[in-house]
Amino acid sequence: MQVKATEPANRLLRAWQLAVLRFAVTLDDDDRMHVLGVAGEVDRLGGAAGDAFHFFRRTTAELCQAISGQDADQDAVIQRFLAQTDNVRLKRAFEAAIARDRTPPKLVASRMKPSNDLWRGLPSRRATGT
């Protein structure tokens, strides 16, 4: 029974993470407002009386400032978010979205091969007799 009770909370938490990713990609104010709205919904799931629980709204505001480059402690804020993200694909997508130098991530860069090796190892047409 307890698994079913946490399922909506997990979905809302994933929606929050995806909204943060969307803001990281677009840096649009509408996306910032959306992620803050989702953060408010997650905070309401905390069940605290009134407006006492505001962890996700505060964290979202910090993240948005860090992603925008307006926070002096932006690397620590972003690393904390990444450390708390359990989905590897989401983590990689977020890292790619916030990459400042726009170089491909290591995983992609290690797979890229120079094009001059494309035909290496294949027999030439003359060698096959055709």
Image: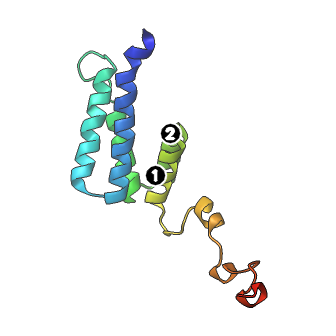
Residue annotated with mark 2: 85
Q: Give the class, few, some or many, for how many residues have Cα within 10 Å of label 2's Cα (few <14, many ≥20).
A: some
The residue sitting at the top extreme is 1
Quadrant of res 24 = bottom left
Quadrant of res 48 = top left
Residue at 63%, 80% in the rendered image: 115
Q: Secondary structure at mark 2?
A: loop
Taking 123 as reference, is 40 above or below it?
above
Residue 46 drawn at (x, y percent) = 34, 20
Task: Say which of 87 and 55 sits in front.
Answer: 87
Residue at 42%, 8% in the rendered image: 1
Residue at 40%, 19% in the rendered image: 6
Residue 104 drawn at (x, y percent) = 54, 66
Question: Which amino acid does the dot numbered 2 rest on?
Answer: Thr
Quadrant of res 36 = top left
Residue at 32%, 24% in the rendered image: 53
Q: Secondary structure at mark 1?
A: helix
Residue annotated with mark 1: 94
Task: Say which of 5 and 36 sits in front.
Answer: 5
Question: Which amino acid does the dot numbered 1 rest on?
Answer: Phe
Residue 73 as seen in the image, left or right of residue 122? left
Q: What is the quadrant of the C terminus in the image?
A: bottom right
Residue 12 drawn at (x, y percent) = 34, 31
Q: Give the class, few, some or many, for how many residues have Cα within 10 Å of label 1's Cα (few <14, many ≥20).
A: many
The reply to whether the C-beta atoms of the residues labelled 1 and 2 are less than 8 Å apart is yes
C-alpha separation, residue under disc 1 versus residue under disc 2: 10 Å
Q: Is residue 14 visible?
A: yes
